[in-house]
Amino acid sequence: MKLALLNQRDRQQSILKIYVPNEHDSALQRPGETMNAPHGFAMFVTLTEFNQRFSEFVAGDEMFVGAEVIPVD
């Protein structure tokens, strides 16, 4: 899975994180309890970094987030 916070001034400066799941991860199995353990990104972007670069990510009250989910065989 890819998750991106797109920089509206310079796409090369966007924040991009990639998560590659382990097929044996218990979080990806059929739930045995009320819910599975969480998995993914522990911290995508800190609030401090987002606030420091706010004008790069938000323009005209718009913010763009990209996500790509790749199915695992």
Image: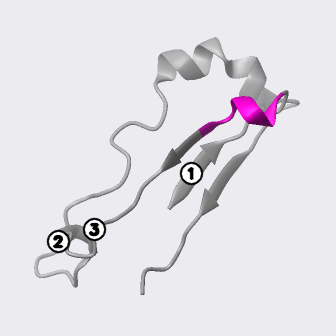
- Image position, residue 26 (x, y; %): 17, 71
Q: Is residue 32 visible?
A: yes
- Identified by mark 2, the residue type is Ser
Q: Residue at x 88, y 30 (%)?
A: 60
- Image position, residue 61 (x, y; %): 82, 33
Which residue occupies the foreground of this view, 6 or 13? 13
Label 3 element class? loop
Above or below, 11 against 48 in this view is: below
Above or below, 42 against 19 in this view is: above
Q: Real-space Cα distance between discs 1 and 3? A: 17 Å
Which residue occupies the foreground of this view, 40 or 73? 73
Of tags 1 and 3, the one toward the viewer is 3
Q: Check the picture and name the quadrant holding the C terminus.
A: bottom left
Task: Give the residue pinned by disc 1.
Answer: 3
Magenta extent: 10-15
Task: Give the residue pinned by disc 2.
Answer: 26
Which residue occupies the foreground of this view, 33 or 46? 46
Mark 3: few, some, or many residues within 10 Å (few <14, many ≥20)? few
Task: Give the residue pinned by disc 3.
Answer: 22
Q: In the current view of this chain or complex, which residue is farthest to the top?
A: 52
